[in-house]
Image (tube, grey):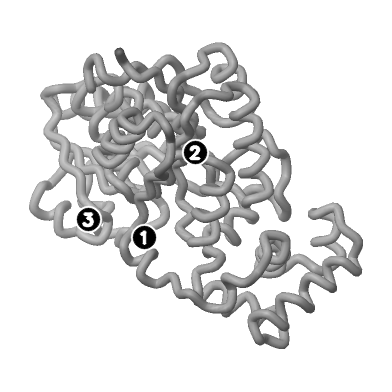
Amino acid sequence: MRVLVVLTPLMYREAIAHSLRQHRSALEVRIAAPEVAEENLKVFAPHLLLHDDTYGLERAALESVPSWVEIGYSDSMDAWIYSGGHLKKYEDISTDILLGVVDEVAERLGRP
Amino acid sequence: MAVRVVLVDDHTMFREGLVSILSSRGGGIEVVGHSSTGEEAFALLHQNSPDLVITQIDVDLHMAKEVLRRIREASPDSRIVVLTIFDNLRYVQALSKLGIDAYIHKTSSTRELVATIDSLMREPQGEHMVVSMPRGSLERMSEGPMGTLSERETEVLVFVARGLSNHQIATEMHLAEATVKRHLANIYQKVGVRSRSEATRLALQEMWIGITEITQADLDGAGPGSPEVAR
């Protein structure tokens, strides 16, 4: 399963990607700056996208991804999660919640 | 012997990721605790007395001073690494004067953070401060007249930029309104402007204050707010 992390700033992007790789070693995780997110969406075709609300991704770009997590920096890292056709909000998202989303997407895909 | 680290940041998922990176360094770094900012963090520091505290500080100087004072009080011998989204020169200088050991902008890589920890541990005397900031920010910082403002005058200017009236500034800073007016008159004279908006524009142009420093107030409330929260 492929996960694209385009969060800002860089330190956040790297830290969260590291957590994903450490806890779910079978994942293929790529990080990219938001400026090149759309290009990476086309080339990498992730099953899950992690982005934030500071860089406005085109709606069409978001619709091209089966599942996404949008972090809102305006209030203590709350997150909107879109997965399986449902949109949910989490306050102060943790690694455990993110891994739950990853597992849910992987299960739907039928692969690790 | 491993460097004992306490990590303080409000963003749980980011904090957990950093813990994971630092812990994966093997014997070199031991994360002895982590928490969000506030009382929990000060208690953690008091209990553990770590060699190093890595803390988020994304608040105005008034609050930053109080946060650093509380950190010193809780763990006097810890070296302090500040992680921040503020990228203006005045902030770096002010925190340097407050005795921090490293100023790392969050656009830096985690590798730079790890290298900073190594560097600080190799230099126990603390004669040098490590600064990691975007090159563009440093290059845009000029030696203009804003540099002549006192710390108090700069504090007033930040509140002006946030759109506070003299009366509101006086309340926030626990000053008389006449004192605020006097500070403003000094600011106008020193930097050669005639209005609040001109002063704000110049301060932003010279990067003496940062956009984040102004907009952060919208998140925290109009003023500095409670000192124990360093968001």
Within 10 Å of disc 1 (Cα), the crowding (few <14, some 14-19, many 20+) is: few
Q: CB of mark 1 within 8 Å of CB of mark 3? A: no
Q: Identify the element where label 3 is drawn.
A: helix
Q: Amino acid at mark 3?
A: Ala
Residue A52 vs residue B192, the one in the foreground: B192
Mark 1 residue type: Gly
Q: Nearer the viewer, mark 2 or mark 1?
A: 2
Q: Which residue is mark 1?
A: A56
Distance from Cα at disc 1 to Cα at disc 3: 10 Å
Which chain does the residue under circle 2 lie in?
B
Q: Residue at x 57, y 70 (%)?
A: B147
Q: What percent of the width, then of the height, locates residue B230?
A: 59, 39
| Rendering coords of residue A89 (x, y %) | 47, 36
Query: Residue B99 location in percent, x, y?
Result: 54, 41
**Residue under mark 3: which chain is it in?**
A
Q: Quadrant of the N terminus of chain A?
A: top left
Dots 2 and 1: beta carbons under 8 Å? Answer: no
Assign a secondary structure to mark 2: strand
Q: Relative to residue B46, is residue A20 depicted above or below?
A: below
Query: Do discs 2 and 1 belong to a common subunit?
Result: no
Q: Residue at 35% across / 19% down in the picture?
A: B3
Q: Position of residue B126 (x, y in %)?
A: 43, 36
Protein chain holding label 1:
A
Q: Is residue A67 visible?
A: no
Foreground disc of the pair 3, 2: 2
Residues tagged by mark 3 and mark 2 found on one chain of the structure? no
Residue in the foreground of this view, choosing between B173 and B100: B100
Identify the residue shown where x is 20% and y is 50%.
Answer: A32
Crowd band around label 2 with a 10 angstrom C-alpha radius: few (<14), some (14–19), many (20+): many
Q: For mark 2, what is the residue? A: B56
Q: Which residue is mark 3?
A: A37
Residue found 11% across the figure and 24% down from its top: A26
